[in-house]
Amino acid sequence: MEDRLALGDRYFSSRLLTGTGKFASNSLIGPMLAASGSQIITVALRRVDPKAPPQDNILSHIPDTVTLLPNTSGARTAKEAVRIAHIAREAGCGDFIKIEVITDMQYLLPDNHETLKATEILAKEGFIVLPYVMPDITISRRLYDAGAAAVMPLGSPIGSNLGLEMKPMIQRIIETSKLPVIVDAGIGRPSQAAEAMEMGADAVLVNTAIATARDTAIAGRAFAMAVTAGRMAYHAGMAGHSNRARASSPLTGFLRE
Amino acid sequence: MSFLTLANQYQSFDFKTYFNSIRPEDVQKTLDRGAGGLKRLETRDLLTLLSPAAEDFLEPMAQTARELTCRHFGQIISLYAPLYISDYCSNHCTYCGFNALTAFPRTRLTMEEINREARAIADTGIRHILVLTGEAPAKTPLSYLEAACRVMARYFSSIALEIFPMTQSDYQVLHRAGADSLTVYQEVYDQAVYKEVHPKGPKADYAFRLLTPERGAAAGFRAVNIGTLFGLGNPKAEAFMAGIHARYLEQAFPHVEISLSLPRMTRAGGAIAPKHLLPDKGFVQTMLAWRLFMPRLGITVSTRESAAFRDRIIHLGATRYSAGSRTDVGGYAVHTTDTTAQFEVTDTRTVAEVADMIRNNGYQPVFKDWEIF
Ligand code: SF4
């Protein structure tokens, strides 16, 4: 069977999610998507202006074949996130929603508590909810109970390019989560994206590193290749990775026979 | 602890001696720590970066500032326009053409006129508005401002206020009416100078003004923009005070976006000759020092600055520009002849021209970066 990423009732062959923020020009988004093969792209609803001329309207730069993942950037509370999700749906952005509730502008770290509350409400309303959280096993379990479609732990703060600062915590979420795990934020280099995928992440979201590269299309392609390589390595069950024990027979199984 | 405590502590600080004691090695050390934005720079580092010794390090400071800004904001400049709705003022600010002693026909726009102005601005593509008045609560009471916000909310996705300092509960009323951001400049942090240039009127109360950003943040505004008017006090000391004020607000109100502006007096414009001109080099140094000190700080640059200068400083940490500005009441659509402006607009380009300039510099002009919800 084809190795696809399942989110809600949808399947994706690309495991690289991208973003629309921070590009020097919106016209770079289309070529980046084409080069990277990314099938999901996140858009801050606060940036969407249907009244703007096409060149300034982000949505007009995204092909119909790519799934829009509106995000609630700017929300400080669950209530605001829910409100933004409703506006996104009314604006025709579909049923996907990335919940981003940030109450700390200094480090831009997500507020897990409010994010969980918003997830509960929006999942009940039929949204395909992708919550962006601080890596924490308990929150990832509760998000599952709340009906989230995935959990998106951060690798390191947004825009920091520090990579998998949270690696041990993300590892634990990968080991325990019943939801797809999408590592979001802080991935600054393709090698870090590959590392997340090797660990067993189901996908990664990369925005800043691609959007601020000198050649955004080539950067997108490099990340796509890294994600594929990381995924292959994970499937190959290479030594030193946690899925190795699962992929091969337990060494001591015979003792129980 | 409010910022007043901190501000008071620095009133007797000997900035001059301290600044002059900083050596190039100190600057290098601070730059090494600040590179990559991994380590947080402290108050002492801000002093170091503003010192005369740091003037020889503007290029490496600029490189770091550019990288930090790009990572946190992207290759983006947000655009806004100011809308002056009333020029009545009961204050006596010696440096301002709107002050109570200046005789000129004063104007206060009606709601219908505000509507016309707003539409004219929105037609240029602008989605973020900054609403300005003088300080004359009798002429522009809360109910007037509230009604003005409601009119503005029809046209704009973000409404910022630059009006007279209010109480927290009055700000809450305007917040509910659609205003989401607050701009208030201390003008000058040095208390002696403050007293001298604000001899009369409600603005003479230093502390009430100083704590305005805190009241605004507590009232629920999502963004607060502060600054000092360069020209009144010692520029390096003022830049430092504004910087630590921003840091204080960032820590006291972590959910609020903090930004700084650098309005500066010029020799020609204004009612009095500025005591301390801030040269272009000093302007740039201030901007860079602030950026390194606070990597996520918003930095706003208005059309007080010349077109040529604004074109260059896009790369040095700025995040928000005004464009197509009129600083006279009714200047966009209501009046056809020129009336008195609070300050002269130096960059007189249209919104479209400023947007093109931003694109030509490899940045994206962003018209909408908020949603009133
Ligand atoms: S600076 Fe403001 S408060 Fe002072 S006189 Fe001018 S308009 Fe009035």
Image (tube, rainbow, N blue to C red):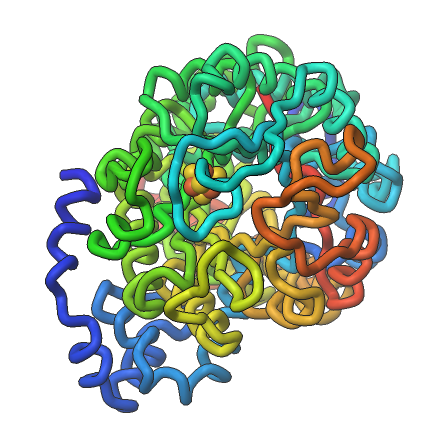
Dividing the picture into quarters, in which one does residue A194 lie? bottom right
Residue A59 in the image, given as x and y percentages of width and height: 80, 37
Q: Is residue B275 visible?
A: yes
Q: Is residue B161 left or right of residue B1?
A: right
Quarter of the figure that contains the N terminus of chain A: top right
User: What residue is rendered at 42% in x and 55% in y?
Assistant: B229
Dividing the picture into quarters, in which one does residue B257 lie? top left
User: What residue is rendered at 33% in x and 57% in y?
Assistant: B243
User: What residue is rendered at 30% in x and 38% in y?
Assistant: B200
Q: Up-down: is B225 above or below A195? A: above
Q: Is residue A42 visible?
A: no
Residue B3 in the image, given as x and y percentages of width and height: 21, 44
User: What residue is rendered at 78% in x and 32% in y?
Assistant: B335
Dividing the picture into quarters, in which one does residue B312 lie? bottom right
- The foreground one among B189 and A156 is B189
Q: Up-down: is B26 above or below A3? A: below
Number of labels in the image equals 0
Q: Up-down: is B297 above or below A86? A: below
- The foreground one among B158 and B307 is B307
Residue A173 in the image, given as x and y percentages of width and height: 40, 39
Q: Is residue B96 left or right of residue B233?
A: right
Ligand 1 is found in which quarter of the picture? top left
- The foreground one among A92 and B124 is B124
The residue furthest front is: B103
Residue A6 in the image, given as x and y percentages of width and height: 66, 32
Quarter of the figure that contains the C terminus of chain A: top left
